Image (tube, helix red, strand yellow):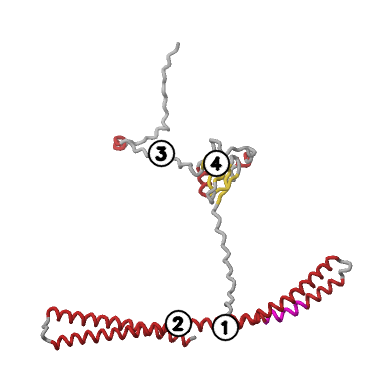
Amino acid sequence: MQQHETIVTSLAKRGEQLAAKRAAAQDTLDRAITGRQQTLLSGDLGDQRALDKLQANVDAAASALAGIDDALVILAHQKTEAERQLGAERERIERASAADKLHKQVVAIEAALPGYLAQSKALADALSDVSHFHFESGQMAGFLQNTGSQIEIAANFTLAELKAMPDAIRQGRQPIPREVATAPVPLPEPASPTMTAFMLRSARYCDPDGRRRFAGQWEDATMPVATAQRALGKGIAAPLTDPRRAQLRGARGGDFDPKAPDVVDLDAVAEPPTAPKIEPDTVLREANFTVIDRSAEARTIEIEVPRT
């Protein structure tokens, strides 16, 4: 096979070299045609010697290009034939390897069969010895005897076919046995992180698979981490360590209405708006007032109250 590979590589390299020469020959022909054309259009038509020389240049360049084209055609046929021979040699080697492997497998089967039949017969005989008082042993003995007879008959046909297959594989009359491709076991996708919280209000939310879920008031609910944190931040749920959980968990006894108007949609709840920043008055800011602490000063205030 190495010889065929060397031939294919050599022909491919030769093809690259001829392709480069063809490009150069085409360029030479184009220049020769251009020179002849320019002379015919604007040169001395009476100078026959010069015209003959230009025509000879064109003829020589065209002949050289045609010769290279012929060589490329022949080379392509040679390369195709060499590749065919290389493929045939590879198939021959593959078939020989497959035939040898099958031959060894058939030899192993043929060697194991007599021992299996002998052991089956010995087991059937041992079971038959106790079958007169043990029904199940008799059933097993009958099964072994029947199975052994069927296997012995089938082996005569099977081994004959198996023994003929290696030669058929070598000669191309039998497909090459292929190994059974085992399908890769898909790895389970990692579960999305979740968090359990104690619900202070009934709520709806979407689980990681996009399905709508309901969490009842005063019950534990497992939900996506982002949803649980949103519920905790809104006061809709509390951590499992909240003391109210020990007192209120399950207090409603499953009496829930998922369609009730007070059920909160955790996926639609909005963040609380932030209060706008109030800038101080410009006049007050420029006045630069100073705060004086007078809390320690003693003060007496008299209030006149009319008496009736």
Above or below residue 280? Residue 122 is below
Q: Which residue is mark 1?
A: 171
Gap in Å between the C-alphas at discs 2 and 1? 20 Å
* Nearest to N terminus: mark 4 or mark 1: 1
Q: Residue at x 56, y 36 (%)?
A: 260
Mark sitting on residue 150: none
In-image side of 209 versus 82 (left or right): right
Q: Which residue is mark 3?
A: 275
Expressed as whole percent of the image width and height from the top left, the position of residue 136 reads 83, 65
Expressed as whole percent of the image width and height from the top left, the position of residue 241 reads 59, 45
Circle 2 residues within 10 Å: few <14, some 14–19, many ≥20: some
Circle 3 residues within 10 Å: few <14, some 14–19, many ≥20: few
Expressed as whole percent of the image width and height from the top left, the position of residue 60 reads 24, 87
Q: Which residue is mark 4?
A: 203
Quarter of the image for residue 12 reads bottom left
* Nearest to N terminus: mark 2 or mark 1: 2
Q: Which circle, 3 or 1, is nearer the viewer?
A: 1
Quarter of the image for residue 159 reads bottom right
